[in-house]
Amino acid sequence: MSQDNRFSPEPPDESPETCSPSESPPLVPARPQRLEATVSRPGLDSRGSVFFAAVEMTRMPMVLTDPRQPDNPIVFANHAFLELTGYAEAEVIGRNCRFLQGPRTSREGVAELRQAIEQHLAVSVELLNYKRDGTPFWNAVYLAPVHDGEGRLVYFFASQLDVTRRRTSEQAFRQAQKMESIGQLTAGLAHDFNNLLLVASGNLEILRSSLGESDLQRYAARIGKALERGTKVTRQLLAFARKTRLDPRPTDLSTLINEFGEMLETTAGSRVDLQFNLRRRRPPAEIDPVHLEMALLNVIINARDAMPGGGTITIATAAGAPRHGCPEGRYVVLSVTDEGTGMPPHVLERATEPFFTTKGVGEGTGLGLAMVQGFVQQSRGLLEIDSEEGAGTTIRMLFPAAREAVAAAPRPRPAGPLANPAATGETILVVEDNEDILNLALEHLGILGYRALAARSADEALDLLDRPENGPVDLLFTDILMPGSVNGFVLAEQVRKRLPEVAVLYTTGYNEDLLAEAPRSASMDVLGKPYLRAELADRVRAALDRTARPALARRTRPGAPGPRHEG
């Protein structure tokens, strides 16, 4: 309870705000009520009645204050109030209730209580108060005046209730809603930004090939580096939004970290002692190993930056049990512990928010832990962060254990460029609703020697297939998301009904939910945006080579047109 009759509450150190022991929703406004009580014998000397016994035994914290005395002090507090606040009776009797206030107690809430007291009204309000040991708690206060038989104000009665758990749950729900909304917005922005990056990087690639050994190459190189950083940011945004296209498979975490150890040590730097506590004979985790490496690098970078003077980072693996928020089953735990500065509570609460960072300008994007959390959640796992200011930080990533055994052979690394990705007269139908991206794809394919047909919608693509002068199509290169009800998957099905052996290569700016639900086949492949010409060449050649249709027969048919580029 935090009320005052002639209360002049000490102004808090900070601007008016409320918070839970974590962070809070807005202040619950006071609700004045026309309720009051009357007593015939206002004294507190006789405490042997059943009513006093009931008040002492109840679990509801209660106090009485005496507005007839200076500063409206507490004159009675039951055992429940003393247990709630941690004070002894001698420490509260004779004091104004403002001793429960703290730096984050709302001035507006105290003002509402004071106004109700001045007007002799009953009121209920929720305030952030503080216990004797400094622990904050949300206090639901109900305050009412008590009069004597002649209508004179003799006491204020106040009951309290610790509602911290409810407020914290409400705040967690609001935070989850906020992060989901941010994730949806972020995914859409990243998709659009990927399209812009693709146009910029693709045209820069064409421009650089025409500059030769000109001095302008160094300016083009700077632009290229900036575009690479932009691409990295969009990937982090998509990971935070849980829209990254993952390829989960049974992976032994200890083996993966051993293979990746040299890169981790290089990232940690010479002033950091990187220690490994990797348990063997643990179940493999069902994860995408490439994205796990990216997540682990982000955690190591944060740990390194938290120890500017150097220190020890410990990477450990272990079997784990389900935690709150995890489905039942077996889990594998990957933890990273540093000896750095740690995080105070207000920073820890926001550690995984996108763009939140305590680093200086230009030293970080604030997307590292946001990306890690997005990846872990998309992997059906859980991210836990324990940190104390001045005592370091431990980050634990819990992943579901795989049902299958991990292969004995080492995990293959991504393959390099194909030896011969050149065109041999194939025809490619490009379907893209974005005009700039469509023109860029046609430009790349023309330079590579392919004959390209352009369509801006699924209907236009099907119309091109029906025109005999266009000849047969060897590959459908289509965006997944397009205006209208026909997306890239539906278009591919319709094209294959007409050309059963046609190869299909999809492209997308991010991993929509429908991508996970798409029908899988041996010839299905997805090229993420933005892509370089070399990547396009490799993926087109690979998709064409997987088809059993004899391309040579098509290329040598009578009257077949040679390679050309149609816009």
Image: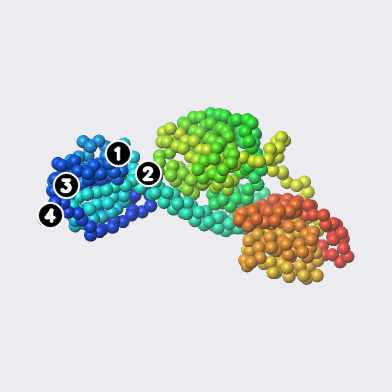
* C-alpha span from label 1 to label 4: 33 Å
Across and down, in percent, residue 271 comes to: 51, 30
Mark positioned earlier in the residue sequence (3 or 4): 3
Of badges 3 and 2, nearer the viewer stands 3
Across and down, in percent, residue 348 comes to: 44, 42
Residue under the point 51% across and 38% down: 395
Residue under the point 48% across and 43% down: 363
Of badges 1 and 2, nearer the viewer stands 1
Disc 4 designates what residue? 149
Decide: is 459 above or below 93: below
Residue 66 — which label? Answer: 3
Mark positioned earlier in the residue sequence (1 or 3): 3
Dot 1 crowding, Cα within 10 Å, few <14, some 14–19, many 20+: few
Residue 388 — which label? Answer: none
Residue nearer the viewer, 41 or 413:
41
Q: Amino acid at mark 3?
A: Asp
* C-alpha span from label 3 to label 4: 16 Å
Dot 2 crowding, Cα within 10 Å, few <14, some 14–19, many 20+: some
Residue nearer the viewer, 506 or 88:
88
Mark positioned earlier in the residue sequence (1 or 2): 2
Mark positioned earlier in the residue sequence (3 or 2): 2
Residue 83 — which label? Answer: 1
Of badges 2 and 4, nearer the viewer stands 4
Mark positioned earlier in the residue sequence (2 or 4): 2
Q: Are marks 3 and 4 in contact (CB under 8 Å)?
A: no
* C-alpha span from label 3 to label 2: 31 Å
Dot 4 crowding, Cα within 10 Å, few <14, some 14–19, many 20+: few
* C-alpha span from label 1 to label 2: 18 Å
